[in-house]
Image (tube, coloured by chain):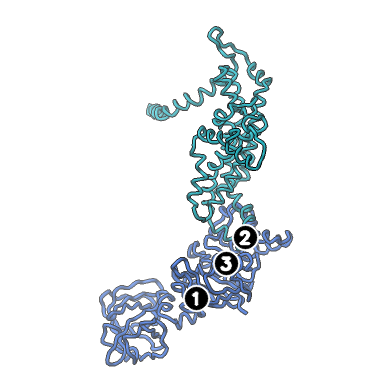
């Protein structure tokens, strides 16, 4: 009896957290999976079970494939550049130099700004004729170019904004990790005759591996998750040239109201992200030294 | 030719002077200790020799070459840090080989030297481990290994034993000294522990407030301290420093009526006498009152007061005297040292007067 009471006690304590978790995480996930096997219900035609029909549509959907490829290029364009930039910025402000606090703040500012505001600022940079970029290229007599309006450059512009936004955020993690490295390592390496690059390559970079892994997982997730600026800058256009998977998912679900198809898209996105994260940890975990 | 030489080396941190015109030589193949209380500039001096800090003025020579402007890697020195500074993600072998890889020593040569150093330090079974899997003493050996594998003629050590427990410290002290003599390296060794200095050094450079107080062999530092500070820094417990006063018969302990310790003016003098030179006398000597006694096994520390002076006597065996009891303390005239009360420098011109018996 006492044992039973103790169990009840424990479950009651867990209940609030469990309710929230089930209501807002597990139930929606399972419901989405469930819905992806049905057709989209209409007022005059209720949803019927269609099996893998939605997934078959997805395979034949050119816009989905273009969004996915765009997303791959978007990830390839943003992740290495933003991480490398973050590391360089962190190394730069980790030294004792004048105005260090100001520089750190300046690097971090893009992270603090809401993505919508960031997108609006960049919208001005890319504006044809009187935008900042146009004015700069005009000074050198280069021909005018509609950066966001042409399929060849729209995705690159969107990538540039994401890099600008993310690098400062990742820098904070690198900066924190760099400050955990005792300065005496640099001194020991210097006495042994190691140059700065050698010291960075053999000591600093390996010691930053846990941070790099963390940042990498975040960057990958963000490259599929962070699409706010697409809404403001291109709306996926022109001709789906800057459409990313999550943006396409939004359009399918909330503009075309094809919720069942959107559910199938969601499942594919989830599966892709989960497998990437697992692969990253499996590959890099072994090479990472945790203190 | 001396392996290390400093000429008027000065280091300023803003307005504070950490090292003030320090000059000394270290002979090749010897072990010199930089000794002093914390904040005396000994670690800074070592870092100036290593090139980890730039001198404000003065010159540093290593192996006869002026290295004042050279970076640490070009000074041909190795160094052991207080915290060992082992790279946590590298194995013992990789830590030891770090410098050789930097200098692109061929692989067979590296392996040969690693095997020898690991053998020498008893690390052979541990080469694959990470530093976090080692005990403090083993980490210390790895740091030593990284220093000696470079086969540089000069090795710098920054309080290498301060993180070890007393027993291990004692063993490592002997081991480092044996290694230094076996390999014939020149060692500059920083410590605040006078026992380490006395037991290991060929020469002790005693520093205080960035200046050299005395640069001498351990025996001389003990037998003929150059300043009152040197006298009170060396020895366990340190030398008793006694303020003197003028009296008709000569200099007496301040606050007492006699007997005279020296035929000189007392007010400008300090007398020094080692606790182990004091003994109890029945009729002669200086009258004193026991304040406390501390029994340490092999001997007893008797803390006494004579006038203004507090005298610690180190007496063999167990001595049971109650606090407040009157005693008489005596010593041999040659055990008495004199220092100037103003400059605190040794005064060899003052001769001790034998105590009346």
First in sequence: mark 1 vs mark 2: 1
Single out the mark in the foreground, 1 or 2. Answer: 1
| Callout 2 and callout 3 share a chain | yes
The residue lying at 61 percent from left, 28 percent from top is A244
Tags 1 and 2 touching, CB below 8 Å: no
The chain containing the residue under callout 1 comes to: B
The residue lying at 59 percent from left, 52 percent from top is A204
| Residue at numbered disc 3 | B51
User: Marks 2 and 3, Cα distance to the nearest angstrom?
Assistant: 30 Å
B69 relative to A105, above or below = below
The residue lying at 56 percent from left, 17 percent from top is A257
| Callout 3 and callout 1 share a chain | yes
Give the number of the disc on residue B21: 1
Give the number of the disc on residue B123: 2
- Quarter of the image with the N terminus of chain B in it: bottom right
The chain containing the residue under callout 2 comes to: B
């Amino acid at each position: 009896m006492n044992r039973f009471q103790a169990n009840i006690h424990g479950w009651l304590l867990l209940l609030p957290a469990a309710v929230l978790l089930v209501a807002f995480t597990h139930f929606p996930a399972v419901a989405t999976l469930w819905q992806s096997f049905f057709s989209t219900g209409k007022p005059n035609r209720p949803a019927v079970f269609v099996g893998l029909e939605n997934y078959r549509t997805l395979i034949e959907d050119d816009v989905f494939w273009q969004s996915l490829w765009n997303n791959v290029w978007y990830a390839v364009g943003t992740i290495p550049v933003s991480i490398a930039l973050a590391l360089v910025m962190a190394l730069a402000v980790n030294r004792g130099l004048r105005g260090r606090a100001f520089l750190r703040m300046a690097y971090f500012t893009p992270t603090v700004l809401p993505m919508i505001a960031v997108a609006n600022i960049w919208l001005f940079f890319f504006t044809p004729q009187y935008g900042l970029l146009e004015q700069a290229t005009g000074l050198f007599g280069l021909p005018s170019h509609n950066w966001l309006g042409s399929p060849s450059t729209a995705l690159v512009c969107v990538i540039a904004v994401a890099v600008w936004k993310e690098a400062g955020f990742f820098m904070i993690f690198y900066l924190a990790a760099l400050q955990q490295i005792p300065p005496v390592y640099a001194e020991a390496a210097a006495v042994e005759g190691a140059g700065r690059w050698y010291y960075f390559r053999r000591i600093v970079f390996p010691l930053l591996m846990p941070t790099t892994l963390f940042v990498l997982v975040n960057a990958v997730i963000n490259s599929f998750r962070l699409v706010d600026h697409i809404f403001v800058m291109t709306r996926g256009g022109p001709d789906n040239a800057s459409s990313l998977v999550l943006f396409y998912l939004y359009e399918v679900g909330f503009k075309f109201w094809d919720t069942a198809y959107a559910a199938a898209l969601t499942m594919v996105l989830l599966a892709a992200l989960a497998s990437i994260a697992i692969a990253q940890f499996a590959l890099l975990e072994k090479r990472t030294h945790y203190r | 030719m001396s392996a290390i030489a400093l000429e008027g080396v000065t280091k300023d941190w803003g307005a504070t002077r950490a090292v003030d015109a320090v000059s000394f030589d270290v002979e090749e193949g010897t072990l010199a200790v930089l000794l002093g209380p914390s904040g005396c500039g000994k670690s800074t001096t070592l870092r100036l020799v290593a090139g980890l800090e730039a001198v404000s003025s003065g010159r540093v020579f290593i192996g006869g070459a002026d290295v004042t402007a050279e970076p640490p890697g070009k000074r041909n020195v190795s160094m052991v840090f207080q915290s060992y500074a082992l790279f946590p993600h590298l194995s013992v072998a990789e830590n030891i080989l770090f410098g050789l890889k930097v200098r692109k020593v061929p692989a067979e040569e590296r392996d040969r030297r690693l095997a020898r150093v690991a053998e020498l330090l008893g690390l052979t079974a541990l080469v694959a481990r990470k530093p976090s899997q080692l005990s403090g003493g083993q980490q210390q050996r790895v740091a030593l290994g990284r220093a000696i594998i470079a086969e540089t003629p000069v090795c710098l050590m920054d309080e290498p034993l301060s993180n070890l427990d007393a027993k291990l410290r004692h063993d490592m002290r002997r081991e480092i000294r044996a290694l230094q003599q076996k390999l014939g390296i020149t060692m500059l060794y920083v410590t605040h522990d006078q026992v380490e200095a006395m037991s290991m050094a060929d020469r002790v450079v005693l520093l205080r407030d960035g200046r050299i107080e005395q640069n001498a062999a351990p025996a001389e530092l003990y037998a003929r301290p150059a300043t009152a500070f040197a006298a009170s820094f060396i020895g366990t417990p340190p030398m008793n420093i006694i303020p003197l006063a003028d009296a008709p018969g000569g200099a007496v302990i301040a606050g007492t009526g006699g007997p005279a310790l020296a035929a000189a003016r007392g007010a400008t003098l300090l007398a020094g006498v080692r606790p182990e030179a004091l003994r109890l006398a029945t009729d002669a000597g200086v009258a004193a009152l026991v304040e406390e006694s501390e029994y340490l096994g092999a001997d007893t520390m008797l803390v006494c007061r004579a006038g203004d002076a507090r005298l610690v006597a180190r007496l063999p065996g167990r001595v049971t005297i109650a606090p407040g009891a009157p005693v008489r303390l005596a010593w041999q005239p040659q055990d008495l040292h004199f220092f100037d009360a103003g400059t605190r420098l040794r005064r060899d011109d003052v001769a001790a007067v034998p105590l009346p018996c």
